[in-house]
Amino acid sequence: MRKKAKVHEDLEFYSVMRSVKAIEDSDVCLLMIDASQGMTSQDINIFSLAERNKKGIVILVNKWDLVEKTTQSTKKFTEEIHKKIAPFVDVPVVFTSVETKQRIHKALEVALKVYENRKQHISTSQLNKVMLPIMEAVQAPAIKGKLIKIKYITQLPGKTPYFAFFANHPQYIKEPYRRFIENKMRENFDLTGVPISIFFRSKDGEKDL
């Protein structure tokens, strides 16, 4: 995609539309940004589109060979990218150069790994073994005097990772606790580069949140 300011003609408009369609049809998106510019607003918009469509994502920092570097360069650059795409920061960043072919194969290797992460199925027994003790130790805040207890977890069928958490009062679970659960999921299972969906359901299986 070209920068918005450069999209003037119908040809460019349809090129953008094809790019959007390509994102929607893909399994993993490689988002290439310019090392000299960093993560721009348009890059963030494209990233958000891929995330909303639950696509695997790898960020490629191109023209890295032209950047003056220190021993902390890649770490600091990665941290800046993650700040701009928060809270979904579990996204691999590969520093490349199309001109010199630097780390091109590495980019493909990382994309294939993200693809495997996206299609994996985590067993119900493993989910409950790992996550139930975590949520028992740090419980969701009580609302209106009601204690919230998550009793069971399973992965739902689908092309991307969807997880159902069965609770006694799912309607009272708020976004901060959802983020806590997602972070713990990412700490304990390899979901790098993959947007995940978490649903809270009542004990009878009806989705409440």
Image (cartoon, grey):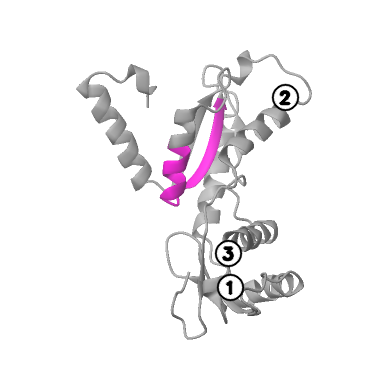
Task: Specify the amino acid type for callout 2.
Answer: Ser
Q: Which numbered disc flags the more N-terminal residue, 3 or 2?
A: 2
Q: Position of residue 135 (x, y in %)?
A: 70, 71
Q: Is residue 67 above or below residue 147?
A: above
Q: Is residue 62 above or below residue 129?
A: above
**Labels 3, 1: front one:** 3
The secondary structure type at the circle numbered 1 is loop
Residue at 48%, 29% (x, y): give it: 41
Q: Position of residue 94 (x, y in %)?
A: 60, 33
Q: Which numbered disc flags the more N-terminal residue, 3 or 1?
A: 1
Q: CA distance from mark 1 to mark 2?
A: 39 Å
Say which residue label 3 marks.
Answer: 174
Q: Is residue 157 above or below residue 78?
A: below
Which residue is situated farthest in the right direction here?
71
Residue 73 disc label: 2
Task: Specify the amino acid type for callout 3.
Answer: Lys
Say which residue label 1 marks.
Answer: 123
